[in-house]
Amino acid sequence: MQVDYLIVGQGICGTLLSWFLHKEEKTFLVIDETKNDTASKVAAGIINPVTGRRYVYSWMIDEVMPFSHNTYVQFGKHLDSEFISQKSIIDFFPSVQMRDAFITRIIEDDRYLNTYPDQNYFNQFFNYHFGCGEIKPAYLVNMQLMMASWRNYLLQNQSLQSHNLNLQDLKLHHDFIEYNGITAKAIIFCDGVAAMNNPWFNMLPFAVNKGEALIIESEGLTNEHIFKKGLILSPLPVKNTYWVGSNYQWEFENEEPSSKFYEHATQLLNRWLKSPYKVLFHHATVRPATVERRPFVGMHPHMHNVGILNGMGTKGASLAPFFAHQLAQHLVYGFPLAPEADISRFSRILSREKN
């Protein structure tokens, strides 16, 4: 079997890279081991233009957000589905100081920040004491539906093999790669935390973090917005169900769901929600962020047919479409990559790994 590209992993990076290569009429094969709790599958799929307690605008958001929105819309049309919806984020202030910080940011730059007109509206659903602000536009991406729909499409077109790639069976030649009877121009690793054990990329400065989330059911909440107060509460496609989670944990004992998070999350929910709820599931996953909080994109400086698309961290829903497209354009047309993401910035480190 001969294809243009071999893609390892069908998380959000592998899904979107293969989509853009498909649009360029390139042939590819995706190799992906089926797992339930991967970083992409557990993620809330929120595109939030604001980050941090100081309400700083996310890196490249003015360019990344409209591009990502258009990508998910077009991708959904191709698969006769809808993968993205617009929501605003209602941020309940934990203190007077945070309320003042929000107002100060509005005065400085109000592109995405607004005062919510009716400060008492959400009293019917939540307990809060210091008011709320609104972040808009924000978006919700249905990651599970998107990846499952694309996986079915790939299987129908014999473009996916469901197993764990064995690096010992991978052979690199000057102008092509070979794997179990498959030849390709290049292999691109989009395999999340597994890249930390990859012999070509394990010297990159990964910063692994853990994310946990509860899936709850409640008939007394609204699905009009995404809500934030210590935790993020985001509506899911199934009626009366919600994703409840935190962004990340830098220190953790293992990859399993922890009682510490469960207790912390339910205590916050008990104080925050006015209606009863039931916990349906508790998920946990480890994801590959980076020390610089910038992605790893591009081809190995000494192995021109071995590439990577990884390290999107907690911003995968917004960053992955933009950089998957950049990498596809780089592979097909030789267009340059953004210097902040191009792994050529680590040429010296990767050279050290080679010797």
Image: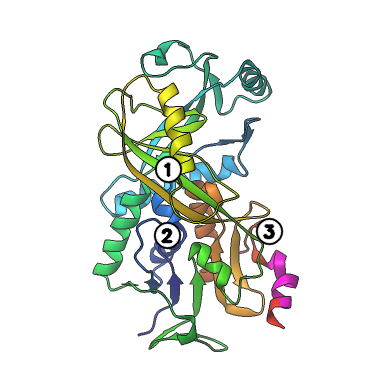
> What is the x, y in percent for residue 243?
38, 38
Residue at 35% in and 74% down: 163
User: Mark number for residue 11?
Assistant: 2
Left or right of 72, for residue 276 = left
> What is the x, y in percent for residue 74?
37, 50
Q: Secondary structure at mark 3?
A: loop
* Amino acid type assigned to the residue bearing label 2 in the image: Gly
Is residue 333 magenta-colored? no
- Numbered disc in front, either 1 or 3: 1
User: Mark number for residue 339?
Assistant: 3
> What is the x, y in percent for residue 89?
47, 29
Marks 2 and 1 close (CB-CB < 8 Å):
no
The part of the chain drawn in magenta is: 344-352
- Numbered disc in front, either 3 or 2: 2
* Amino acid type assigned to the residue bearing label 3 in the image: Pro
Relative height, residue 175 to residue 194 (above, below): below
Relative height, residue 115 to residue 278 (above, below): above
